[in-house]
Amino acid sequence: MNFHVLRLDHRRVRDARITTHVCLTARAFGASKVILSGDEDKKIIGNIRDVVKRWGGNFEIEYIKNWDGFIEDWKKDGGEVIHLTMYGEAVQEVTTKIHESSNDKLIIVGGSRVPSKVYQEADWNVSITNQPHSEVAALSIFLHTLFEGKEYEIDFENSELKVIPTAHGKQVQKRKKTL
């Protein structure tokens, strides 16, 4: 089962930093792909591809113009949709249901105002608290809860760089990539 993240309504000028953080969080916490909608942003796409090149893994990023049609096609192909929100079933209570299906999952995180169609199309509207919060925080908490902490064990294969955990300072190992 693959987990892809759909970032709704990216605004190039206003959202560059937060969208970058959505992408980095998705990759670090075990998602296999981010799909950006809204403004096309080749700089973010290039930056994330560069992170994957240096830090490894099989993570992908792409842009789509029409998120609405994408969600419909995703569902027609047997995929399921998870919308992270503050209005929905509590994350700690719904992840078991989500695990019961082996279908690929599309995790939707909002940008500006999320259209009601997203709530209606979602197989699960998952609340990460019932308070306003960041889409980056919601994504990390959801993936952490879903993977039960196993995202800490991800091996990002074919990396040029690897952080060696230390109590003080920074230690980065440079490795030769294998093909």
Image (tube, rainbow, N blue to C red):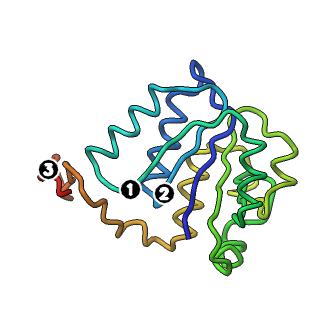
Q: Is residue 100 above or below residue 54?
A: below
Q: Which x, y percent locates residue 126?
A: 73, 60
Question: Looking at the rendered structure, which numbered label has been put on residue 166?
Answer: none
SS type, badge 1:
loop
Disc 1 or 3, which lies upstream in sequence?
Answer: 1
149 shown above or below 19: below
Residue denoted by label 3: 171
Q: Locate the C terminus by quadrant.
A: bottom left
What residue is rendered at 44% in x and 25% in y?
Answer: 43
Residue mark closest to the camera, 1 vs 3: 1
Q: Residue 68, how many percent across, how many down?
A: 78, 42
Whole-number angstrom distance, CA of label 2 to CA of label 3: 27 Å
Give the alpha-carbon distance from disc 1 to disc 2, as whole Å.
7 Å
Mark 1 vs 2: CB contact within 8 A: yes
Label 1 to label 3: alpha-carbon separation = 24 Å
Residue 32: give its label. 2
Q: Nearer the viewer, residue 27 or 138?
A: 27
